[in-house]
Image: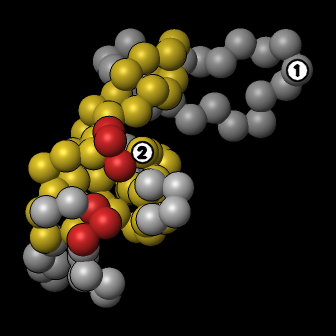
């Protein structure tokens, strides 16, 4: 299955790859309120994880994912997503 074929209203997740700022352990770092000239606390790198699909844009072929490890949201091209599967929500 491809992202463009996911039926509306269903919950899906996928593995993804993106370039972002990472800490020494390889986890994404979100810098908030950086001042002009202040260094970012992370270093650029490639991050791979599992993400829950929040929204998708078929025109731009991008998807917004919520990372299951860091809870951060990333916008990723369809080409950088793979291993799609449905989500079973358990309370």
User: Can you say which quadrant of the picture contains the C terminus?
Assistant: bottom left
Residue located beneath label 1 in the image: 36
Q: In this rendering, would 32 be left or right of 11?
A: right
Residue 9, position in %: x, y? 31, 86
User: Can you say which quadrant of the picture contains the N terminus?
Assistant: bottom left
Q: Which mark is residue 77?
A: 2
* Neighbourhood count class around disc 2 (C-alpha, 10 Å): few under 14, some 14–19, many 20 upward: some
Q: Is residue 9 above or below residue 39?
A: below
Q: Give the residue drawn at x 32%, y 39%.
A: 80
* Front one among 63 and 35: 63
Residue 32, position in %: x, y? 69, 37
Residue situated furthest right in the rendering: 36
Sequence-first disc among 1 and 2: 1
Q: Secondary structure at mark 1?
A: loop
Q: Secondary structure at mark 2?
A: strand
Q: Is residue 52 above or below residue 27?
A: below
* Front one among 78 and 13: 78
Total marks in image: 2
């Amino acid at each position: 299955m491809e992202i463009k074929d996911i039926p509306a209203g269903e919950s899906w997740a996928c593995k993804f790859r993106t370039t972002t700022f990472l800490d020494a352990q390889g986890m994404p770092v979100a810098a908030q309120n950086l001042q002009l000239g202040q260094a970012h606390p992370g270093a650029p790198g490639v991050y791979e994880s599992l993400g829950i699909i929040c929204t998708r844009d078929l025109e731009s072929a991008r998807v917004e994912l919520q990372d299951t490890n860091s809870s951060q949201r990333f916008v990723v091209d369809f080409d950088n997503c793979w291993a799609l599967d449905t989500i079973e929500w358990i309370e």
